[in-house]
Amino acid sequence: MMVLVALVFVLLPQAVCKLPNAKCSIRDPLPILHKYYQPGDLNIAGISSQNFVFSSPMTFEKPPSTELFGDIMVLTQLYQHIVALAFAVREINLNPRLLPNITLGFQIYNSQFSASATFQAAMELLSTQERLIPNYKCDTRSNPVAVIGGPNSNICLHMATILSNYKMPQLAYGSAPVLDTENQGAFIQQMFPNGTHQYMGILQLLLHFRWTWIGVLYLDDDNGERFVQNVLPIFSQKGICFAFIECLPRQGSSSAFGEILGKGINMTVGIMASTASVVVVHGEIQTMLVLRTLVQFWEFSSGLKNTKLLVMTAQMDFTSFHLQRQWDIDFIHGALSFAVHSKGVLGFHKFIQNRNPISEKEDKFLRVFWEHTFNCLLSDTKVDMANEEFCTGNEKLGTLPASVFEMRATAHSYNIYLAVFAIVHALQSMDFSNFKKKAVAGGQRKKFLIKLQWQLQRFLRNVSFNNSAGEKVSFDQHGALQSGFDIINWVTFPNQSFLRVRVGSIDPDAPQAFTIDEDAIVWPNISYQSLPISLCNDNCHPGYRKGKKEGKPSCCYDCLPCPEGKISDQKDLDACFQCPDGQYPNNDQDSCIPKYITFLSYEERLGLSLALLALSLSFITALVLGIFIMHRDTPIVKANNRSLTYTLLISLMLSFLCALLFIGQPEKATCLLQQLAFGFIFTVAVSSVLAKTIIVVIAFRATKPGSKMRKWVGKHLATSIVLSCCLIQAIICTVGLSISPPFPYLDMHTMRDAIVLQCSEGSPLMFYSVLGFLGFLAIVSFSVAFLARNLPDSFNEAKFITFSMLVFCSVWLSFVPTYLSTKGKYMVAVEIFSILSSSAGLLVCIFFPKSYIIMVRPELNNREQLIQRKKSSL
């Protein structure tokens, strides 16, 4: 059915032209096909394009970048595709090892980027030479073994619509078509790598240069729609946002250009006014014509130059757009494009140089190319020759600017060259396979290869060989060429010449699939040779993080400062992060600074001051103890229980000295002694105070007649109280030390800029149990002393003990919140100060009044005075 539709599409215009009064011209849907035929035992067909044919004239206020010959627009660069096929056939015929005793020929047709011309070319391949009668062939000379088609997907699709029904192997050297049926796909090989590799390469290129805010232009065809629907969502998932996504109309007729002009104002103004500096263009080989028209329209209407960096897909060909020397090519200066990986073809440059319309009369393409390239007419051209310049035939292609015609093989030409060799190697494999089955005479081999051409596709799928450049050529399971892509940087010059500079590659089989040489890239002039920036907004500098902007794409965001204690050391981080242990953020919160180690040392003023204070208090306590020992037989010393007094003074002196254990670099031994000394010494001190208080109360009660408390008066009660309290505290300390002993540790987090080296309390329960037991003893002492404050002065220390316990309890009650609210070494200082102040409170309140009497008022320190004071109090 598809063949019938195509046949009607091809033959109907010819029938119409034969009607009376019918006017047919080059504007008819069926154009005249240029052909290039070279006979051979086996033929390879080519369906390529060299020009557009328009159905109606085009009008511009300013001529576009095209060169029109009547209604034909010739793309001079595409003539190289025809030359590449002819050159490959010539190389094969000169190599006796490839197809011995068989001459390879070719027949090339011009599809003119139109469906009707492509269908007509496909029909002619199925017809007798020079007669368009499909399925009727009176000879086999023109019967091709395979067809090479391109350069765009539409040509390959129209070609496959007919030829796949005849199981004819086809190789597409441009972009791969979206095929309607599996039958079509079974007979098409793609001389183009898997497109996924290219798309991932574009994505990696955008991410490498941090171009996250881009524009997209795509061609209005199946490939373009597939790109937008399947590929752009992947870009979005990787953080790429789109300032615009515009669809370019199809090419191939003047109506397409009229459509461009119709919507050109809105499209070009929107594109050029966009803040996106990078535009990804997905199209076909002729898309550059439309793109150049857009750029030209913008430059003509606004007077401004193009300000966008173009990133092109490999299906496009930059050199196909420039058709007139007067139009500059600077709008692609600095552009980046992808191209199928290719190498130079030895001898190709010389082969092109020798092309001449006089010696190559069979090449109909060459005549059109020559006249349009050199702006002259060949002598046998049947047109009005008035005021026209004739071609001499001696013009040199090497003198042409590269923008008009390039002498080096392009990526598309290289693919055609490889396609011809792939067909030949597949024919070799099929020939060898048939020879093993049945010996065939030399003359019969040609007939067998032609007759069994439908089997060629199987061998073509499995072909694998090394080309003249030493590269391996093979196809994957989907029929795509196994190859990578080159990243090309375009550098243009005022004389209309340019350079293709290879600056990177995409090689899926390499350890590093994506490579790019930034130093080799020449950026557009508008960027003053600096890396273009394509962002929705400015980068968030270090010290800031990205914050979502409501109603905007993810690439558009606010920059928020990092919260306290966190940093960001790179641009555009999504979140700030903590510094590693041992480091802290600087003031700008963009880097980490190593913390210094600190502890309460003797070298600093605070530590030295506390140490001197502890030694001074200890010395004072020792003096008081000496005074009491020297005056041990005086009544005031005897009346206050000398043994308890000595015990209390010694414990106070040791408590002052134990404060020194908290100063200096913590060690394992000092951390252990801190808790033991503090807990045990203070227990002895407070229990001694408690014992003195209880002894005072019992002693007074025992003086009353008939008191039963006389038996409790003595040293045994005081000793029992002190030992019992110390035993309980010793049990608490032992249990705590056995569970979790104190140890030195580095506190990384308490202070912002320092690591505090201090002693861990070990078990917090043990630490607060020690304090709790001391507090219990102090409260009991305070309570008993408060109740005994009105006893006779001769026996009464209760007033002094009450006040001392009030000071002691106040100090340690204020210690807990103060200790918890301070950080680092100041926690140790608070603990030392609490030890010194509480001990000093006991020393001052209990012993300074007695020391005053002993040293200053000795007349009061006698028995008569004490008895008199007792009587007066009674």
Image (cartoon, rainbow, N blue to C red):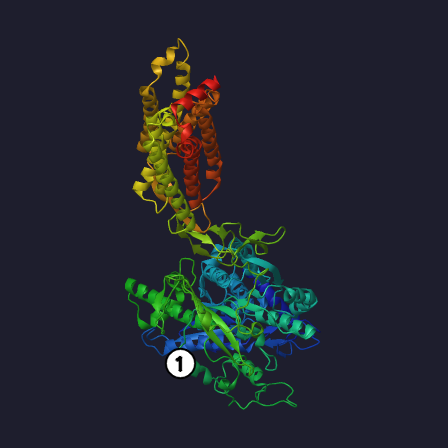
Residue that label 1 marks: 347
Picture coordinates of residue 813, whole percent (x, y): 47, 32
Residue 325 visible within the image: yes
Residue type for callout 1: Gly
Depth check, front residue: 27 or 373: 373
**Res 844 → quadrant:** top left
Q: Quadrant of residue 640?
A: top left
Q: Is residue 1 visible?
A: no
Question: Within 10 angstroms of label 1, few (less than 14), some, or many (20 or more) residues?
Answer: few
At numbered mark 1, what does the secondary structure look like: helix, strand or loop? loop
337 versus 722 height, above or below: below
Tally of marks = 1
Where is 499 relative to 439, above or below?
A: below
Location of the N terminus by quadrant is bottom right
Camera-side residue of 343 and 489: 489
**Could you say which is closer to the camera, residue 343 or residue 540?**
540
Q: Which quadrant of the figure has residue 266? A: bottom right
Q: In the figure, is residue 603 to the left or right of 63?
A: left
Query: Quick check: 230 left or right of 630?
Result: right
Q: Position of residue 858 (x, y in %)?
A: 40, 31
Q: Residue 533 location in percent, x, y?
A: 55, 65
